[in-house]
Amino acid sequence: MRKSATNDDVLSTREAAERLGVALRTVQLWVEGGVLPAWKTAGGHRRISRLAVERLIDERTAALSGTAPLPMLPVLATPEIDGRLQVMVVEDEPELLRLFTLVIGGWDLPLTLTSAGNGFEALLQMGQHCPDLLVTDLNMPGMDGFKMIAALRGVSPAFDSMEIVVVTALSPEEIERRGGLPANVRVFHKPIPFDDLETLVRSRIDGLAAAPGV
């Protein structure tokens, strides 16, 4: 059936996912978090402005322009094995990403590490698989840590149970001026406190090992 001129200006969530090249669940995350403005039809179906989708594509392109694409961090353990802690690091500075990789890899713990260079990349990956622990910066191009965390909260039980740790150079006053963070988000300040992170990771791994069925 041919679309009317009005319908040409809107997309379904599935059409938006195809246009953006992401999973349907990722678009749903972006809608729930306010990244993509949407509304519901009388029949309860979400509709998204085509202009908003195009703007999001432009923002993603701008966020990644000017530098070589950041490669995925090497997986530090065999993925998708029961009992392994799934950790994601979100950081836009390549040097800090490499530092996270080297230090966390040296802990020799049963975990899988993935990374993203900004909030867009992180949400795209989390639309496919939700980590147990998210370690993120706040100041990032495109979608920053504040917007990413807001997009994750209240979407589904899987994301609500994910532990979020912020590692930032922002002061507590600066964080509050920019809207603050949920009370259950732990905040560490740069330089990266790797001893504290290791203690936290080991505690989470011990919790997984003690869980029934693991």
Image (tube, rainbow, N blue to C red):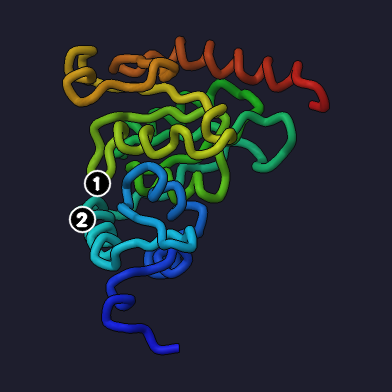
Judge whether residue 93 can be spotted in this image.
no
Amino acid type for the residue under numbered disc 2? Ala
SS for callout 1: loop
Q: From this viewpoint, is residue 138 visible?
A: yes
As rendered, which of 33 and 113 lies closer to the eye? 33
Frontmost residue, 213 versus 40: 40
In which quarter of the view is residue 205 placed?
top right
Determine which quarter of the picture holds residue 111.
top right
- Figure check: 102 above or below 114: above
Residue 103's disc number: none
Q: Are marks 2 and 1 in contact (CB under 8 Å)?
A: yes
The residue drawn where x is 27% and y is 37% is 144
Q: Residue at x 55, y 50 (%)?
A: 128
Give the numbered dot on residue 142: 1
Q: Residue 155 vs residue 99: left or right? A: right
Mark 1 closeness class: few <14, some 14–19, many ≥20 residues within 10 Å: many
Q: Residue furthest bottom?
A: 2
Disc 1 residue type (three-letter): Gly
Above/below status of 175 relative to 31: above
Residue 99 sits above or below residue 123 on the image: above
Image quadrant in which the C terminus is located: top right
Left or right placement of residue 149 versus residue 198 in this view: left
Where residue 2 appears, as percent x and y from the top left, is 40, 89
In primary-sequence order, the first of circles 2 and 1 is: 2
For label 2, count other residues whose C-alpha is less than 10 Å away and answer few (under 14), some (14-19) or many (20+).
few
Q: Residue furthest right?
A: 213
Q: Which residue position holds label 2?
A: 62
Q: Residue at x 23, y 55 (%)?
A: 59
C-alpha gap between disc 2 and disc 1: 7 Å
Secondary structure category for the residue under label 2: helix
Report which quarter residue 140 is drawn in. top left
Residue 50: give x, y in percent of width and height. Answer: 29, 67
